[in-house]
């Protein structure tokens, strides 16, 4: 991630915490899904100008940060993020279930992939007697290998 986007992300996280705002409140203020909003404000998507300006006003961001939010990101490897326990568990789940997911996609759809570009994400809580469950839905468009 470029330095300006990383600096903007830190400014956003600090202000969000200081102001006691939730990601859902910020997302609602700009009219975007909370999952996309978090990813975008942490530097993984370019934020449309109108949304970047609204976030800037809501959080009192510097002009530099508002401009940085609008830039196309460099999406690179996870680096140190892979050591975070929550992120590592997703890597672990893909290591264990990735081959099965691939087989099931190919069996159901044919030769192709799930898009991570034409993509939706939902994170929610589901009550369970043995402890609340984290429900993560990855919803990507099927793209066939077209030779």
Image (cartoon, rainbow, N blue to C red):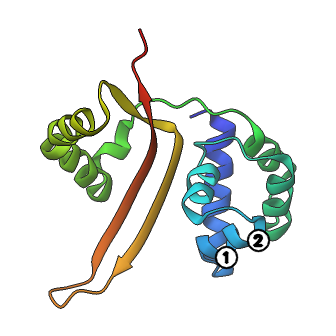
Q: Are marks 1 and 2 in contact (CB under 8 Å)?
A: yes
Name the residue located 36 percent from the left edge and 41 percent from the top edge.
80
Residue 29 numbered tag: 2
Above or below residue 46? Residue 61 is below
Measuring 58% from the left and 42% from the top, which residue is drawn there? 44
Find numbered disc 2 in the image and state the secondary structure of the residue it sits on. helix
Counting from the top left corner in percent of width and height, residue 138 is at 40, 52
Q: Nearer the viewer, residue 106 or 14?
A: 106
Q: Quadrant of the N terminus?
A: top right
Q: Residue furthest bottom?
A: 129
Vertical placement of residue 61 versus 143, above or below = below
* 88, 12: nearer the viewer: 88
The 10 Å Cα crowd at callout 1, few under 14, some 14 to 19, many 20 or more, is few
Q: Residues within 10 Å of mark 2 (few under 14, many from 20)?
A: few
Residue at 22% x, 44% y: name it: 94
Residue 133 drawn at (x, y percent): 27, 76
* Residue drawn 82% across the image and 60% down it: 56
Q: Which residue is mark 1?
A: 25
Viewer-closest of 64 and 56 = 56
């Amino acid at each position: 991630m470029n330095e300006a986007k990383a600096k903007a992300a830190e400014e956003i996280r600090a202000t969000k915490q200081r102001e006691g705002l939730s990601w859902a409140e910020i997302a609602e203020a700009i009219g975007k899904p909370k999952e996309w909003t978090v990813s975008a404000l942490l530097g993984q998507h370019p934020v449309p100008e109108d949304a970047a300006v609204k976030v800037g006003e809501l959080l009192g961001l510097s002009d530099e940060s508002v401009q940085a939010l609008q830039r196309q990101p460099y999406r690179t490897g996870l680096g140190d993020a892979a050591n975070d326990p929550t992120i590592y568990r997703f890597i672990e789940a893909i290591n264990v279930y990735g081959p099965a997911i691939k087989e099931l996609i190919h069996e159901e759809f044919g030769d192709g992939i799930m898009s991570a570009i034409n993509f939706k994400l939902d994170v929610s809580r589901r009550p369970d007697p043995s402890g609340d469950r984290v429900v993560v839905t990855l919803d990507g468009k099927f793209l066939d290998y077209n030779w």
